[in-house]
Image: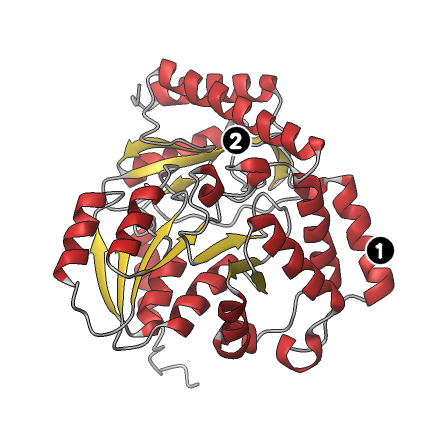
Amino acid sequence: MSSTAINPLHFLHDQLEELEAKGQHSRLRVLEGEQKPVAHFDGREVINLSSNNYLGLTTHKALRRAAIEAIRTHGVGAGAVRTIAGTMDLHMALEEQIAKFKGTEAAVVFQSGFTANAGTVAAILGKDDLILSDELNHASIIDGCRLSRAGIRVFKHRDVADCERLCKETENWPGRKLLITDGVFSMEGDIAPLPALCGLAEKYNCIMMVDDAHASGVLGRNGRGTVDHLGCHGWVHIQVGTLSKAIGAMGGYVCGSRELVDYLYHRARPFLFSTGHPPSVVATCQAAFRLLDSPEGERLIKKLWSNTKLFQRRLKKLGFSTGTSETPITPIHVGEAAKAFEFSRRLYETGVYIPAVGFPTVPEGKARLRAIVTATHKRADLEKACETIANTGRELGLV
């Protein structure tokens, strides 16, 4: 390229400068060592309220042992996509284990929760079909809807009446219809009105799909998710979960009928064109599901909820708004994005790491910090974090 040529990517520089001017530009925090409740980021020890490691399984000894043993017996990689030569006995065993755990006929493991959502929606629907979607559904659902080329109708967040209005308006839609919602919403921490939505899906002949990423390992019996928590077994046709949050490893999965899974084996593009999970990751996930169904798993989930209630109670008493959260996801509402990012920066400098979230992840004017409590936080960690949040919040005039 000549020195006088115009860089066609110069617009990226302009947009990054705009983020800087708004106080919304952030740099990646680098974790040095293990993902723990007190961790080292960029050389600083902080109380870590930023991870999805709900049960602390990223460092659990049983999961470590399983990973090491799988490397010894199966090597470090699958070596191919699942549909050619990359399906190992470990993959099939994990899928059977997940299906049993979730109470469905079958399950298929994807490379991430994102690809599980996007790949499934895009595989089962086409341009003649229709999707009814909660306005705060995860980006992976939104992308899957767009990739499917189906018609899209968005209903107000958790608003059953608005959803039914759309169901009635599209009652005579000639193609297939999908009603889709997060089980737990990742930025608000609230829970979908699943029984009512399932009733609408049945009444208006819709496929019912739930993304249970933030409910897996958190809600329901031994962490079976919102379908179990809200008693909706048999009403949900497609359940999506993650292996990257409470399970402590990486990946996503889809549960449902045997025919659904067989179809996804043949038509879900992320599954078809991505190498299978490494044996160590698969074995780690198997160990995590075994742990969930044990007394230790029950104890960890109880501790998670105990810590959550303590933390949220203290924040509310200090005068912070945590919105409609019903789960360990705890938004601390700020409003102005620049102030939210400054709040996060000052907390980090004083030993508490809670990331700020602004547009486009949340709407303009609704910036917040998003804290997530885990089972492995000590009471002293949470007390200290709340004290620091209170002091910094006062400095910024937030309380």
Indicate whether 369 appears above or below 239: above
| Residue depicted at 73% across the width and 48% down the height | 287
Quickly name the residue at label 1: 69
Q: Residues within 10 Å of mark 2 (few under 14, many from 20)?
A: many
The residue furthest right is 72
Q: Position of residue 347 (x, y in %)?
A: 47, 29
Provide the secondary structure element on which disc 2 rests. Answer: loop
Looking at the picture, which amino acid does disc 2 mark?
A: Val
Q: Position of residue 358 (x, y in %)?
A: 33, 45
Q: Which mark is residue 393?
A: none
The image quadrant where one finds the N terminus is bottom left
Q: Quadrant of residue 39?
A: top right
Indicate whether 312 appears above or below 267: above
**Residue nearer the viewer, 237 or 347:** 237
Q: How is the image coloured?
A: secondary structure
Task: Kindly report the distance in space between the C-alpha atoms of the residues bearing marks 2 and 1.
Answer: 31 Å
Looking at the picture, which amino acid does disc 1 mark?
A: Glu
Question: Which mark is first along the chain, 1 or 2?
Answer: 1
Q: Position of residue 41 (x, y in %)?
A: 60, 40
| Residue depicted at 51% across the width and 63% down the height | 257
Residue 124 falls left or right of residue 129: right
| Residue depicted at 72% across the width and 76% down the height | 79
| Residue depicted at 44% across the width and 40% down the height | 231
